[in-house]
Amino acid sequence: MSHVHITKSLFVFTMEDIIKYENVSYSYAYDFDDEEEELNNIQVPHVIPFAVKNVSFSVKQGEFVAIIGRNGSGKSTLARLTDALIFPTEGKIYVDSMDTSDPELTWEVRACVGMVFQNPDNQIIGTTVNDDVAFGLENIGVPTDEMQSRIDEALRYVGLEGYGDMEPHLLSGGQKQRAAIAGILAMHPKVVILDEATAMLDPVGRKEVMDVVHRLNKEENMTVLHITHHMDEVVNADRIILIDNGSLVSTGTPKKIFSQGEMMRKAGLEVPQVTKLMDNLRNNGIDVPDDVITVDEAVLALEKILVK
Amino acid sequence: MLLRIEHLSYTYMKGTPFEKKALDDVSFEIDKGDFVGIIGHTGCGKSTLVQHFNGLLKPDEGNIFLNEQCINNSNIKALRKSVGFVFQYPEHQLFESTVYKDIAFGLKNEKLSKEEEQQRVIQAANAVGFDLSLLENSIYDLSGGQKRRAAIAGVIVMNPQILVLDEPAAGLDPLGRDEILDFAVKLRKEYGITIILVSHSMEDVAKYANKVIVMNEGKVEMIGSPGKVFEDEDRLRKIGLGVPQIATLFKKLSVAYPQYNIDREIFTVEEATRFLLRLLGGENK
Ligand SMILES: Nc1ncnc2c1ncn2[C@@H]1O[C@H](COP(=O)(O)OP(=O)(O)OP(=O)(O)O)[C@@H](O)[C@H]1O
Ligand SMILES: Nc1ncnc2c1ncn2[C@@H]1O[C@H](COP(=O)(O)OP(=O)(O)OP(=O)(O)O)[C@@H](O)[C@H]1O
Ligand SMILES: [Mg+2]
Ligand SMILES: [Mg+2]
């Protein structure tokens, strides 16, 4: 099993592909292994529904990639595929040069990819918050004397200091999410996948957690796949992957993706409030740029015309 | 007065090392037809508070009146028809084998014909934008957002008097969020249903609520119209909250351009567009 210590990554200055998706398709309909059931009960549908369809892209080591798409578009399926929880029906995924379909490598892939699930109840298993974080650390062989400091650090990351002895089921919704995130960050995985991991956090909490993730991304070259419906969390990503109906629709910088309002709307998504405001003004003949995605950029754009 | 909360306090795990006073002397009133937004940082007591409205939790101290009747000791079953409740993790609310059965579950006691039942289920599913072709699917085969829509459909199918939504939009895409909240607005307009929305989205609360309750550490920190509450950005930030992006923009503009009398009570894209077009004299298509 690979050790995922906090050694300063060797790859800081090389931009190597750490994940590669090659023509990946996935259908849940193929996923039963009980042959008898397959023969007797399940009527094979005329059209096999694919949750992910012929997706190809790669992610560089240390990249911060946001994955966006409407409900049911295939984001979580893509995440599960990356973490070798399920395997491509067609195509291949390579994580740190490991073929995720190779049963001998399953555990190594999972050690490399830390995934925070959409629902923290599917993730938290310890009887206390402390135990829960410790459990993951034991699994990757962190020495006992290092354990508590790693746990404390992770709880601090997510603002849960003092909650170590609490039973997870007694936590509030947002506290549970924080605990789930702490459990993964404590392991310092090479790749972290956050599947709507911030959905239940308050605005400041969301910002704090995202700041930590961005910091680990920069300082430890941790690769991040961030799945979210919060467009304000996406503006700082290196790149956005937009998927709809299982297919990759577009990829590019946040500016590039958000300036295509029509494409976003078609994919069932929306742009940040200030982008929308600028779109509205432009449609009414006011000369403002089409790539405004933050409040400060909006202030700049408006200053230009207000001064006139 | 539809709902009146008087000096409500609640403590979890009394007498243990984990004792936690989650609500501390909370009082407020909600009128029939209000759209109330409840905001506050994680763990401040929002879910604890709203779970008192449907009888899931009973007050340690204080009283709760629904239609001037004390409901301190009413159980969930008695309140089910008047208070519809969508939990923060609605997955916990889904337990039937198919989505259809799950949505129809609450209707069991209403003695409807098969057709009437079907109609109600389809109406509820449509209202939350649930793909009808998935009605016969097992709930385990749904994406996160699809599960959430199913759970909400199962509650609104009952036509409750009060609809409590505990972070209903978490996990929904923007379209789904608008669908659910617009539907809440419709329920309010057409049937006078009172909506109580717990949310971390300042944008949604600003856009939909006529009354905002700000909680902090188990206490009511502020209460008032969105205009009044979101004006105090610093105070909100201090307690873990924020203001809609547009409010931040307008605050910055009003500081930079005092001469334009920039309205600081603007926090939706629509209001902002109207205001700026008037100021800048756009074509107003
Ligand atoms: N276990 C499953 N069995 C069968 N179908 C599934 C299963 N999980 C998901 N699906 C289907 O696969 C498609 C993609 O689902 P997925 O969970 O990947 O979507 P998502 O983009 O994560 O959506 P959300 O934003 O709602 O979480 C959906 O149509 C969903 O109904
Ligand atoms: N069953 C319980 N036993 C002990 N403490 C609890 C229990 N449920 C909640 N708490 C604690 O009570 C406080 C209030 O929790 P509550 O769930 O009401 O918060 P919330 O405002 O809904 O938070 P969030 O936004 O994260 O959902 C939290 O500190 C939480 O840890
Ligand atoms: Mg998902
Ligand atoms: Mg809650």
Image (cartoon, rainbow, N blue to C red):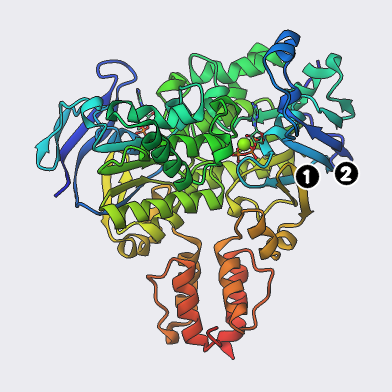
Q: Residue B72 versus residue A35: which sits nearer the camera?
A: A35
Residue positioned 72% across, 59% down in the render: A257
Instruction: Give residue A56's quadrant in the image.
Output: top right
x%, y% of residue B270?
47, 70
Tell me the tag on residue A15: 2
Residue positioned 58% across, 78% down in the render: A281
The answer to whether the residue labelled 1 contacts the one labelled 2, judged by CB atoms less than 8 Å apart, is yes
x%, y% of residue B80?
26, 31
Side (left or right) of A154 relative to A238:
left
Q: Are marks 1 and 2 on the same chain?
A: yes
Q: Residue B123 versus residue B64: which sits nearer the camera?
A: B123
Residue positioned 23% across, 36% down in the render: B24
Within 10 Å of disc 1 (Cα), the crowding (few <14, some 14-19, many 20+) is many
Residue positioned 60% across, 53% down in the render: A231
Give the Cα distance between marks 1 and 2.
Answer: 9 Å
Which chain's residue wears label 1?
A
Task: Find disc 1 in the rendering and name its residue.
Answer: A63
Q: Quadrant of the C terminus of chain A?
A: bottom right
Q: Quadrant of the N terminus of chain A?
A: top right
Instruction: Give residue A81's quadrant in the image.
Output: top right
**Secondary structure of residue under mark 2:** loop
**Secondary structure of residue under mark 1:** loop
Q: Is residue B129 above or below residue A260?
A: above
Q: What amino acid is labelled 1 in the image? A: Glu
x%, y% of residue A9?
82, 34
Instruction: Give residue A75's quadrant in the image.
Output: top right
Side (left or right) of A191 relative to B241:
right
Which chain's residue wears label 2?
A
